[in-house]
Image: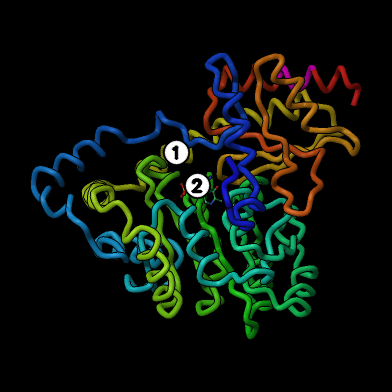
Amino acid sequence: MKYGFSARIQKTPKSFIREILKVTQKPEVISFAGGLPNPSLIDTEKILEAAEEVISKDGRNALQYSTTEGYLPLRKYIAERYSKRYGIKADPDEILITNGSQQCLDLIGKIFIDKNDGVVIERPGYLGAIQAFSIFEPEFFPVNLSGEGPDTEELERIVSYENPKLFYGIPNSQNPSGITYSKEKRKEISDILSGTDTVFVEDDAYGELNFSGKTLPPVKKYLPELDIMTGSFSKIVSPGMRMGWIYAPEEILDKISTAKQASDLHSNYLCQRIIAEYLLSNNIDDNIKRIREEYKKRCTYMIDLMNEKFPESVSHTNPEGGMFIWLTLPKGYSSMTLFDKAMEKNVAILPGTPFYCDGGGDNTARINFSNSDEKDIEKGIEVLSKIFSEWKI
Ligand code: PMP
């Protein structure tokens, strides 16, 4: 059978992560490959209470169709949190609830990207964004990312010569590298974009997961009209509920709302009601504190072991938050070979190549620490360090 699939979908890369996760999901595998929040930190008891409250008190409304923008008390809660955490005065009318923050990327692509439009993305960049934007057939312009954030000279050059529609970045605990942009970089980005037509898509999926609770000003603070923030409850409440949001100027949100109507009418209303009930009757900061402490412990444990056992030629980032550490092997060594070798011993890592939209990164890998306990971290790092010593690197 020959189906007439669109050129668009044929050019969209399959999620390498999803493919790799299929082989790493056997129970005997210690997996540093995925990106799952730790299930023990999902507040099931309180979420159950919230669900019972919503369904027993207002089930017929909560199970009905609803508005595209989303449940107003939830949008108000999110707007107030921006003001509390970042000191930005967000209006609930600038917030729209999405089906996870992944949907924001699809909707943003739909309203901004025509074929061959320029999209700037970090190098390495979030695979899910590369995939979501690829559907719209843009031309990607990667900008190298290192310790302090993106290479702003490169960004400035691309913005002035290529007039890209979007720059997509993750200033807090980036996926995959774990890097957090410095305050100076954030300011520089806003100076570069200010007065241009390039919109900064500021993905803040990990903003709440800074281990010390530190907040740096989002680029949105300096660039309110040219910045779209995306946010998610996946890492702080539950990923399975698929609750995220977009925070954008009203003119942009109006177009997003049209695109969302065409896609799915509105996000799961029952989950919006349950999450709102949960947030309004509990103090989410207590849960976030537990998550930060736990992830910090696991990350520190893993990094200490890496420092002790890995050769100096294998470098790693030192994340201040989030869920990932980025490994760089010496040039000429392949993380795909590392993957194969480690899988022989039932340890999974995620090779870095798919995070490079223009190829490269063969010697890099993403290591997740949020979903393994200390025993597994110790075993997994031991396996990797043995491979490095066999390789004599
Ligand atoms: N942005 C980033 C940077 C992510 O890492 C993820 C999930 N891995 C998402 C967005 C999407 O998450 P969700 O749809 O669950 O909000």
Magenta region: 382-386
Pinpoint residue 352: horizontal percent, then vertical percent.
73, 40
Tell me the amino acid under the disc marked 2.
Leu
Which residue is pictured at 65% across the width and 25% down the height?
348
Measuring 66% from the left and 78% from the top, which residue is drawn there?
191
Q: Which residue is mark 1?
A: 291
Counting from the top left corner in percent of width and height, residue 148 is at 71, 57
Q: Is residue 347 above or below residue 60?
A: above
The answer to which of 12 and 287 lies nearer the viewer is 12
Residue at horizontal 69 percent and vertical 25 percent from the top = 305
The amino acid beneath tag 1 is Ile
Looking at the picture, tell me which residue is in the foreground, 59 or 249.
59
Q: Which residue is mark 2?
A: 209
Q: Quadrant location of the C terminus?
A: top right
Q: Do residues under tags 1 and 2 come within 8 Å of each other at their CB atoms? A: yes
Q: Which mark is residue 227?
A: none
